[in-house]
Structure formats: C-alpha cells, structure tokens
Amino acid sequence: MNKNPVGVFDSGLGGLSTVRAIKKLLPNEDIIYFGDTGRVPYGTRSNETIESYTAQDIKFLRSFDCKMIAVACGTVSTVSRELIKGLPLPSTGILTPSAKAAALATKNGKIGIMGTSATINSGAFDKEIKSYNEKAEITSVACPLLVSLVESNWCGVDDDVTNPAVKRYLKPILENGCDTVILGCTHFPHLIPIIRNIAGEGVTLIDSGLEEAKYIKQYLDENDMRNAPDHKGEAKYFVSDRPQNFSSAAATLLGESIDNECSFIDIFKYIQEDLWTGKQ
C-alpha cells in the first residue's frame, strides 16, 4: 500500500481527461494536477522549450512526493519521451498505452492519429504503432486549433466553430479508410461527441486519457501501490495562470466544481537543475 498521491500534468485543461478516468477507475487515489495554463499550448513550441517546461512541471509535482508521474500531454509524451524515462520514480505518458490499444483495436490495419504539430512531427506514434503491427497503415494529422478550442471550452456537440475544424482534420483520416483513430492529445477526448458524430459509429476512437488511466491502475495493482480501499481519494489542482478561468471550464469537463481545490503557483520557481535528484 502507498498513500502518496499520483501526480498528473498537462499544458492546460486537456489532462483532465486523464484525471476524470483516474477518478473513475481509482476512486481511492489522491491526485495532484498541474495545468500549465500560463504557457499553453505546448504543441507549437520547439523541442527544447517543451523539454524545459517538462522539467519544471515535474519538479513541481515531485515536491508533493508523488508515487507516480502521469504525463497527461501528448506533446510531452512524444517529444520528451527519453527525459521521462530517466525519472527515478514510476512514470507514464499517453504514447504507449494509446498506440497499443489502437494496434489491438484495428480490424483493417489502418490507423489515424490526431495530435499537436509537435506530436505529429516527432513521428513517435507511428514508430510505437509499428512496434506492435509493422504492417499498419498510418495517417497522421496535426490539429493545432483543437487545443485552443478546448481551452476556450468550445466543446459542445453543436458548436459551430469546433465542428467544421474537427471535420477538416478528420477528412484525410476518413478518406484513407482508417477504422481506428488515436486522440493523441489529452485535450481531444473532450471533443469525443463531436468527433463521433463526424467519424461515425464504425470508427473506434482511442481515448488517450482513458488508456493512460488504465495503465496507471494496472501498474499500481501489480506493484502493490494502491491507496487504502477505505480512503476517499481527493484531488488538488494547480495552474500557472488565473485559477478562475481554469476552474470554470474544468467544472464542465469534470462534471464537478473544483473552485476550492484550485490554486495558482509560480512555475518559474521550479528550476530544472538536479531535476532527478529532487534537489534545488
């Protein structure tokens, strides 16, 4: 048994799809969430900037003595993959769980990937999928607008701005006959009702937040790291910009108010030197 919290971070609101899934699958676990809302989006940044942000985000979460770090960000999961692997504590991103789920789900071997520009340009999803199915035919599409639309909470199924954007991004994926689509950014599962309407019931959508939460549950179970079964899990949220903006949208995406659990932190205080030892 391990009572320490699970640390989760993303560039903004997107990672709440992972939090939502953890709350459902692991209701006894405490969660520390950091949304880097002051620097969102990550997907348009250089690899060097993304890695610098990643180091600071992890430094902050490690101050809570987290038992596991969940990178709930597709951009970080792909661009900073090697950096994450070097952590001296259990960690996961969305890459491997989502790629494996897609490889198992596809019937015709044609898989679509929706991600940020940085994620798609990294080619990490293509490589990971090929490790499970070398004959897979992959259609990758960068969807830079979708992160901003979710951050603006324009997620309604009838939204007249988000619908045409999703339709445009899905077009090459559907035209190439993909029967499975990886939502390779944790912002995108918040748009599943819209994506489902456009893609149709015959296309399997891989929810990256859910797949990551499934992996976390499996890891904690296999390593006897779960919290006490009679403990009611609590979540605390931290952001690098105004908490009010985040809390308002989060209430819709999580289906619960977090006004009393959301606080601002100055992420620039968390320098990256000696990141893996935890020393300043």
Image (tube, grey):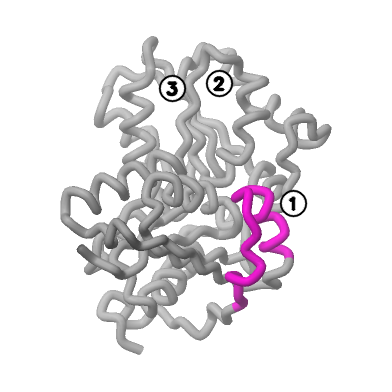
In the rendered view of the protein, which quadrant contains the N terminus? bottom left
* 171 displayed left or right of 103: right
Look at the numbered discs 3 and 1 and tell me whether their residues touch, using CB distance below 8 Å: no
Q: Mark 3 is on which residue type?
A: Ile
> What residue sits right under mark 3 in the picture?
111
* 35 displayed left or right of 246: left
Residue 97: image x %, image y %? 33, 39
| Disc nearest the viewer among 3 and 1 | 1
Q: Earlier in the sequence, mark 3 or mark 1?
A: 3
Residue 5 vs 15, above or below: the answer is below
Q: Mark 1 is on which residue type?
A: Ser
Q: Earlier in the sequence, mark 2 or mark 1?
A: 1
> Residue visible at 52% across and 12% down?
202
> Residue visible at 67% across and 29% down?
194
Q: Is residue 48 visible?
A: no
Residue 162, picture quadrant: top right
Q: Residues within 10 Å of mark 1 (few under 14, many from 20)?
A: few
Q: Residue furthest front?
A: 230
Numbered marks: total: 3
Residue 51 vs 224, above or below: the answer is below
> Residue visible at 42% across and 17% down?
110
Residue 39: image x %, image y %? 62, 66
Mark 1: secondary structure: loop
Mark 3: secondary structure: strand
Q: Earlier in the sequence, mark 3 or mark 2?
A: 3
* Range covered by the magenta-colored residues: 245-264
